[in-house]
């Protein structure tokens, strides 16, 4: 390696309401990694661990720039894993193959949705180790409400029941199908109608305190709200031309949280 390798990977929001564990979107908010010759690698670091799946990290220095809030439901760990994998692939002179990277990174991440979107960008579906990138954008603008509190994914998953009723499964499946149609058609009305889930959000609402409050009283311009991944961040979905109005209203209501209007990134992990 004759020069530094620089890669970046985006934040992500998983589930998008009813598409539990199988859909996610990448956001234009990036972590970065610079790998240089020389230095001592911290082998306990998640990103270095991912790098080591493909290349011995001995003799390399690793500098991570972290902008995605940790343990907030915005795919911070998936981004770090994607960085390590991509950097190792570039060092080896190989091509970035998202499904191969997903296979390697999945044991570190534990679930595929965030990692798939971090690798491919845009809006992705994932199943059985496969990735389908289905859109560059979504019909509404995501406005993130990011609290100071943190949630561990393992703890959030432990709150989910082992079984749900047939009715809850059927209701959620119908809304997941509607979500896919809304994204394919880029239809904001269908998208708003699709944002209903009974598999995970009712059980995670306690760790995402803004969720019930926003759902009960949507701010101006908003069409719905979802819990981002395991929480505690929630994504308030606003009409494209009213995202600023929605953001201002949320800032007034949730002064102890960080409110940020984001956009879907059509790109996944890439050389910086």
Image: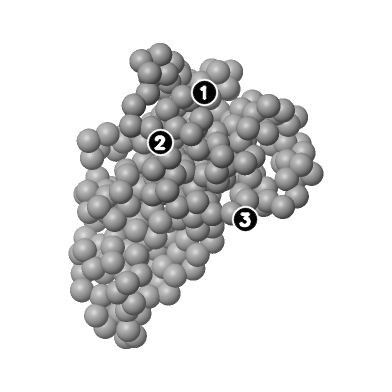
Which percent across, then down, holds residue 227? Answer: 53, 37
Mark 2 lies on residue? 160
Residue 47 drawn at (x, y percent): 35, 65
Q: In front here: 145 or 104?
A: 145
Among numbered discs 3 and 1, the one appearing first in the sequence: 3
How far separated are the C-alphas under marks 3 and 1?
Answer: 26 Å
Task: Estimate the spatial distance between the alpha carbons at disc 1 and disc 2, rounded to whole Å.
Answer: 17 Å
Q: Assign a secondary structure to mark 3.
A: loop
The label shown at residue 69 is: none
Residue pictured at 35% horizontal, 70% vertical: 45
Q: Quadrant of residue 263?
A: top right
Number of residues whose C-alpha sits closer than 10 Å to that of mark 3, classed few (under 14), some (14–19) or many (20 or more): few
The residue under label 1 is 196
82 relative position to 93: left or right: right
Q: Which residue is mark 3?
A: 148
Picture coordinates of residue 41, whole percent (x, y): 32, 79
Q: Where is 179 relative to 143, above or below?
A: above
């Amino acid at each position: 390696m004759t020069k530094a390798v620089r890669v970046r990977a985006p934040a992500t929001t998983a589930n998008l309401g009813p598409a539990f564990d199988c859909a996610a979107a990448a956001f234009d908010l990036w972590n970065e990694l610079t790998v240089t010759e020389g230095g001592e690698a911290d082998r306990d670091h998640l990103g270095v661990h991912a790098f080591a799946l493909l290349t011995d990290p001995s003799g390399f220095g690793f500098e991570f720039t972290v902008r995605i809030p940790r343990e907030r439901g915005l795919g911070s760990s998936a981004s770090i894993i994607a960085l390590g994998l991509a950097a190792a692939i570039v060092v080896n002179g190989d091509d970035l193959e998202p499904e191969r990277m997903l296979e390697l990174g999945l044991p570190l991440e534990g679930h595929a949705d965030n990692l798939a979107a971090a690798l491919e960008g845009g809006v992705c579906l994932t199943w059985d180790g496969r990735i389908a990138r289905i859109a560059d954008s979504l019909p509404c603008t995501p406005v993130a409400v990011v609290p100071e509190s943190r949630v561990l994914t393992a703890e959030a998953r432990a709150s989910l029941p082992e079984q749900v009723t047939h009715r809850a499964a059927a209701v959620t499946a119908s809304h997941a199908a509607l979500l896919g149609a809304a994204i394919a058609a880029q239809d904001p009305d269908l998208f708003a109608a699709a944002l209903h889930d009974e598999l995970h959000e009712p059980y995670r609402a306690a760790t995402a305190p803004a969720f019930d409050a926003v759902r009960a009283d949507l701010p101006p311009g908003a069409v719905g709200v979802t819990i981002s991944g395991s929480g505690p961040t929630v994504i308030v979905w606003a009409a494209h031309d009213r995202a600023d109005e929605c953001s201002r209203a949320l800032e007034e209501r949730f002064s102890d949280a960080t409110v940020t209007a984001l956009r879907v990134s059509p790109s996944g992990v890439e050389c910086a």
